[in-house]
Image (spheres, rainbow, N blue to C red):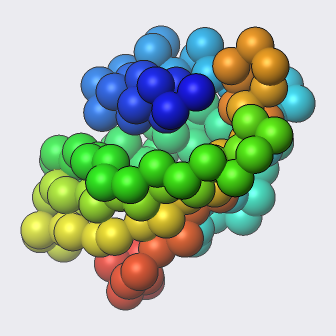
């Protein structure tokens, strides 16, 4: 299962929505501040499109993955990039993710160390 997190993050780093489609269903829910919690594959993919448009470049690096049991994980990442009209971006993120038995993301929630860049 730890490999699923790395595979998801590889697809996220591709910045290609087509690579992210396989991870979500109409029952998936994500919460990536400053956005509100949203559900449904199409809405989730639209959010990722909007996020990607805010950056000239962005990538994530996974540092630690902690299994919580029952297909749930907590993992720590750092994100780096350049925000359009705002300059260099760097942040530390903790994420809680819950996978279904078939490897789809049921729930994902990010917690950012610094939220000033989103204001």
Q: From where the camera sits, is residue 105 visible?
A: yes
| Viewer-proximal residue among 41 and 106 | 106
Residue 14 higher or lower than 74, as above or below: above
Residue under the image location 21 percent in, 69 percent down: 90
Residue under the image location 63 percent in, 63 percent down: 35
* Quarter residue 83 falls in: bottom left
Percent from the top left, x then y, of residue 31? Answer: 68, 57
Percent from the top left, x then y, of residue 59? Answer: 24, 45
Percent from the top left, x then y, of residue 52? Answer: 36, 42
| Viewer-proximal residue among 118 and 103 | 103
Q: Is residue 114 left or right of residue 37?
A: left
Viewport quadrant of the N terminus: top right
Viewport quadrant of the C terminus: bottom left
* Quarter residue 22 falls in: top right
Q: From where the camera sits, is residue 84 visible?
A: no
* Quarter residue 37 falls in: bottom right
Q: Is residue 46 left or right of residue 115?
A: right
Residue under the image location 61 percent in, 48 percent down: 67
Residue under the image location 72 percent in, 64 percent down: 36
């Amino acid at each position: 299962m730890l490999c699923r997190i790395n595979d998801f993050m590889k697809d996220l780093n591709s910045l290609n929505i087509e690579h992210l489609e396989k991870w979500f269903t109409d029952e998936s829910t994500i919460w990536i501040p400053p956005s509100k919690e949203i559900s449904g594959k199409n809405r989730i993919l639209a959010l990722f499109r909007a996020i990607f448009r805010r950056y000239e470049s962005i990538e994530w690096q996974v540092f630690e993955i902690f299994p919580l049991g029952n297909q749930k994980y907590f993992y720590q990442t750092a994100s780096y990039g350049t925000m359009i009209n705002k300059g260099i971006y760097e942040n530390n993120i903790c994420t809680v993710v819950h996978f279904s038995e078939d490897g789809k993301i049921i729930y994902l929630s990010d917690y950012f160390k610094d939220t000033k860049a989103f204001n």
